[in-house]
Image: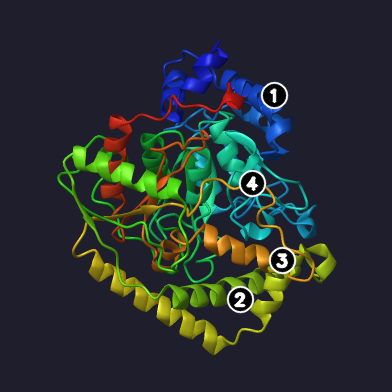
Amino acid sequence: MINMDEFISYDATDLAALVRQKEVKAIELVEASIERIERFNPTLNAVVTPMYEQARKAAAGEFPDGPFSGVPFLLKDLGAPCVGVRMTMGSAFLRDFVPDHDNELVTRLKRAGLIILGKTNTPELGILPTTEPRLFGPCRNPWNIHRTSGGSSGGAAASVAARFVPMAHGNDGGGSIRIPASCCGLFGLKPTRARNPLGPDFGDIFSGLVADHALTLSVRDSAALLDATSGPADGDPYWAPPPARPFLQEVGADPGRLRIGFTTQPPTGSKVHDDCITAVMDAVGLCAELGHELVETSPEINGELVRQAFMVIWSAGCAWIINALGLATRRSPKPEQFEPLTWALYEMGRQQSASSYLLSLTFLQRVARDIARFFQKVDVWLTPTLAEPPVVLGAFDSPPDKPLQGLRRAEAFVPFTPICNATGLPAMTVPLYWNGEGLPVGVHFVGRFGDEATLFRLAAQLESARPWIGRRPTLSG
């Protein structure tokens, strides 16, 4: 029987090895995970839909022989339909919506042997970079329960940071894996556009802005999970370039002497907190110690035009998804069924024209080509993940007469991450720095299109030089 100290000390790879070697049973891991959730979730509010009985049944029976067989796992309550389990997307409109199928990613997660224990908290429709939906209430950061856990995969991040599970599903349309990973001291990778499938319901989401993957305790877990889930599904409109070899083989491989460009200045010109600047400069020093060449540089980006183009697609996407939900539920969406910010964004999206959408998409594709040329001069681009450490809960609230104010505040908080969604580039946040208040402040590394391999090599080198898995918030243990 595994004890709790062991359970919270291991990553998913270690736990899978214990099951494979018959040193523990999957049901023991599931019970340990449920115990953690029942102990700490009343404080954190990270898990909103338990699936305990399904998990116990799966763990006690025959489950697939995969890289993570018997390891407990959590799904984000957004973009991951699981047959027979409600999917609210953080919205009262979907309070009772129950999908009748697994999507392709969930199918692959199950095939990898993961035991799904429940679904995690998310802001309504994943819009904000904090997890404070009106439907479920705020998710709290295990490092400081008065601070945001980030968003939109905030429930997933809080769950992993509190060691409910060693890794959890997330998705990322503007930073929604990397933002909460930074806030909660985790490794968070957004893969290259179309690395993981979105079917059968979607070919892409918001013209390629959204990517699915996970938040993890270790680099190797992220790599091995991506090996298990990536690759095109039948009918996908496009897919990422196939890797030269499994991503897991990149972990521990020599990255060579990389040319790393770095900046602390966002393309939008917004202010960056001193802690976030310090975190980048600390990472610059560490990378230099490891033998890499560091040069202060960044691509030329018209940040204001990127922001405007992104908002055209984001608002149109909000209108599209609400209309689609209306069709799926056979109900007519009404303002009172959504949060004021969501409905205001929906109304903005309804006013966008087809030509403005296509012009915005054309502009962002041009930016992607410009940044691709920038990557002819550097191997990796290093920036802050966020412009501030985790902010207090309520920081993104909007007054009734200004429902979009929270979204404007969000733009100042996340000026670095959305460009990777617009361009499709892989990017990761790495937990290398904690500030004077004991809050994690992630640093952000961006790679060339299709080149998660270099990121995994570098991340593993950084993890070896400055291990973070042993750093746990007081609440977690």
Asked whether disc 1 touches disc 3, contact meaning CB atoms under 8 Å apart, the reply is no
In the displayed structure, 9 sits above or below 294; it is above
From the image, tell me which residue sits under label 3.
Answer: 341
Helix, strand or loop under label 3: helix
Gap in angstroms between the C-alphas marked 1 and 3: 33 Å
Q: Residue at x 81, y 70 (%)?
A: 335
In the displayed structure, 240 sits above or below 150; it is below
From the image, tell me which residue sits under label 1.
Answer: 39
Asked whether disc 2 touches disc 1, contact meaning CB atoms under 8 Å apart, the reply is no
- Residue 164 image offset from top left, x and y in percent: 59, 29
Gap in angstroms between the C-alphas marked 1 and 4: 24 Å
Camera-nearest residue between 70 and 409 = 409
Q: Earlier in the sequence, mark 2 or mark 4?
A: 2
Gap in angstroms between the C-alphas marked 2 and 4: 29 Å
Task: Using the rendered image of the protein, determine whether residue 323 is visible from the camera's viewpoint.
Answer: no
Q: Residue at x 43, y 44 (%)?
A: 442
Helix, strand or loop under label 2: helix
Mark 1 vs mark 3, foreground winner is: 3
Mark 1 vs mark 4, foreground winner is: 4
Residue 329 sits in quarter? bottom right
10 Å crowding of disc 1: few (<14), some (14-19), many (20+): few
Gap in angstroms between the C-alphas marked 4 and 3: 19 Å
From the image, tell me which residue sits under label 2.
Answer: 316
Camera-nearest residue between 370 and 289 = 289
Residue 60 is left or right of residue 69, and the answer is right
In the displayed structure, 202 sits above or below 47; it is below
Task: Using the rendered image of the protein, determine whether residue 18 is visible from the camera's viewpoint.
Answer: yes
From the image, tell me which residue sits under label 4.
Answer: 392
